[in-house]
Image: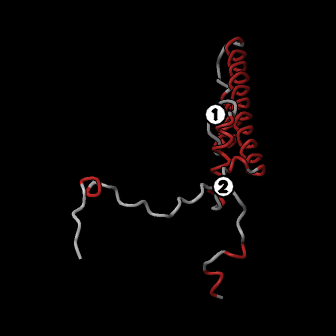
Amino acid sequence: MTQQNPTDDERHALPPIPSWQAPAPAPDPAADPELRALALKHLEEVKAFRIHLSVYVAVIGFLVVIWLLSGGGYFWPVWPAAAWGLGLGLHGASLRWERDPTEEQIAEQARRIAERRGTGGGSVDLGRLEGPQDTV
């Protein structure tokens, strides 16, 4: 048996690539009509909050002008501003400030909803959950 010396090309050759394939990417949650509808609804609620805030500023500003034109004195516009402001603050507590929804924002919101569901795009199969409820 004779042993052959490897050539330079054989010594510097890369090892063979493994024969596995990368997993297929998860489906885009933005393509799911249900998630897309929820995302669009959320983005429309944010837009409604911006309109609510604009009306609040305009009306309270108008009340302050009335107070100024009536001679000042006791600053009564604070009461409608505080009461309405409380409602406005509660309205905005769960929303964040955004512009009109873009396709990218709708897709991102759909992905967030899918992540919260823990499915990456589908619905949760309650029959397959594991946890304390299975030990009874």
Q: Residues within 10 Å of mark 2 (few under 14, many from 20)?
A: many
**Which comes before the other along the chain, label 2 or label 1?**
1
Q: Quadrant of residue 43?
A: top right
The residue where tag 1 is placed is 98
Number of numbered tags placed on the structure image: 2
Which one is nearer the viewer's eye here, 13 or 73?
13
Q: Quadrant of residue 90?
A: top right
Q: Is residue 40 left or right of residue 15?
A: right
Q: Residues within 10 Å of mark 1 (few under 14, many from 20)?
A: few
Reply above or below: 83 against 112.
above
Amino acid type, label 2: Ala
Amino acid type, label 1: Glu
Q: Position of residue 4 (x, y in %)?
A: 23, 66
Which one is nearer the viewer's eye here, 42 or 112?
112
Which element is circle 2 on? Answer: helix
Q: Position of residue 64 (x, y in %)?
A: 68, 19
The residue where tag 2 is placed is 114
Report, in whole angstroms, how far the alpha carbon at label 2 lies from the one at label 1. Answer: 21 Å
Identified at 64% across, 37% down, the residue is 104
